[in-house]
Image: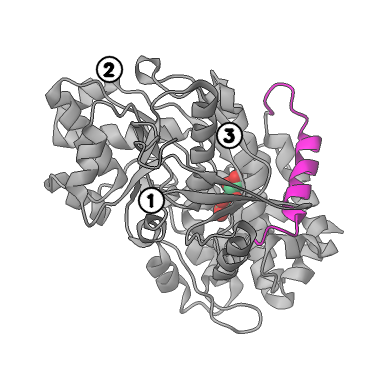
Amino acid sequence: MAADAPDPRPATGIVHLGLGAFFRGFGCVYVADAMAASGGDWGIVGVSLRKPDTRDALRARHWAYTSVTLGQDGEKWRDINVLNDVLVAPEAPEDVLAAMADPAVKIVTLTVTEKGYCHNPATGALNLDHPDIRHDLSHDLPISTSGFLVRALARRWAAGVPPFTVLSCDNLPDNGKLVRRVVLQLAKRIDPDLADWITEQGRFPSTMVDRITPATTPEDIARIDSLTGYHDAAPVLHEPFSQWAVEDDFVDGARPDLAAAGVQMVVDVMPHEHMKLRMLNGTHSALAYTGYLAGHETIAEAMADPVFADYVRALWHEIAPTVRAPDGVDLAEYAQALFARYANPAIRHRTWQIAMDGSQKLPQRILGTLRDNLDAGRVVPGLCLAVAAWMRYVCGTDEAGQPIDLRDPLAGTLRALTENCTTPAEVVAALLSMDEIFPADLARRLRVPVTEAATTLWAGGARRAIKGVTT
Ligand code: CS2
């Protein structure tokens, strides 16, 4: 190809909101593979909803970046070249809306994390008191994810352009239904006719996404530079494993040939999601809180500690009876494969990273499993200990007396509720009163077993408490 040949990148067909490491190491790779297999104009405009860091780091390489697979047998890398532009929403909300309203764009993908939906985690309804939602109800240039979706859909509706498909790639049950619900709730308040049009014509397929993608560190960047021989300020690192199940329900059927890239195109994603959220994310969170408290920096470090290895096995034992596995999947084998993924020493996935935003994660990762077990009359000390460990963690001090850098959208409330408590029982009672996390009936049923777990945890530390539930 001549040196001055036009840029060979495909034209844009996707806008992605929430351009973090996960989507760059996951969705972008699948889209690149789908285009390599079957063509199509599915270039991606990435949007950062808050900070400019990713855009700034990607700019020098014109949005290309290195994707690194962290295998047991070493690191393999490839260049990913599907991003056509990166926008930073607070700097240029108008540009973001214009990109989303472009008729060539057929899909808006999302990885905005649990808190990005501005919903009540216990009910799934849009939180109309959320400051970003209040803002978006009265301004044309939005801040929130649903604000961008609704305002961009409004522009398409006004221009007679079909809606884009909204494809949530966040770890939430029925993520498509959730985003549809919050979008419609907001749209109804802005213009009920718009809401009717979205109801009729919009598509919100649910997905299950799975690839462990720890945050990239400065040491990783230096190491990858010497591996590749060029400087990349924004490489992504991830495990070899990857699984994406997507409901095949797109506006006008317009989508990349995802199946050619290995995506499972399914009619009902629920069994996949359910299994993954409970078996993987549930144990991840349990290990994150207990592991952090006990001084384990990463999941792999915790897995190398036999007490924690026993704990995760005990948890799967408690979780599995509540899971309806997808056809052809054996839950014991699934758990065994998860164990090997967690234990991969090449993955430095910090317990602190997974511990973030627990108030938004607990309901779908652990509380649903707890409820199903209680309904069936089963005693589940491992899961109760996980809830107690989250409570101990959000009190803000680890077992060595060091302060915890607590990241959670409800951090203020968590602090206010716990700071004057003097006993674990008081902490449990105070936190169980948060009905946006614990519905009242569940809180009542959890009070005794979680207080029991908390008392042991406070008295003897996480490691000892774990031994108590595994022996
Ligand atoms: C993790 C997930 O950070 C977290 O909360 O549990 O990001 C997890 O690594 C992915 O869901 C794996 O697919």
Q: CB of residue at label 1: within 8 Å of ligand 1?
A: no
Would residue 259 be seen by someone viewing this image from the given angle?
Answer: yes
Q: Are marks 1 and 3 in contact (CB under 8 Å)?
A: no
The residue segment tinted magenta is 325-348
Which element is circle 1 on?
loop
Disc 1 marks which amino acid?
A: His
Q: Is residue 405 left or right of residue 463?
A: left
Q: Mark 1 Cα within 10 Å, few/some/many (few <14, many 20+)?
A: some
Residue sitting at 72 percent across and 58 percent down? 346
Locate residue 322, reporting x and y percent: 68, 36
Residue receiving disc 3:
273
Q: In the image shown, does 117 or 467 lie closer to the viewer?
A: 117
Q: Which residue is mark 2?
A: 200
User: Between residues 143 and 185, which one lies in front from this camera angle?
Assistant: 143
| x, y percent for residue 71 | 73, 50
What colour-coding does the image apply?
Answer: one colour
**What residue is disc 1 on?**
62
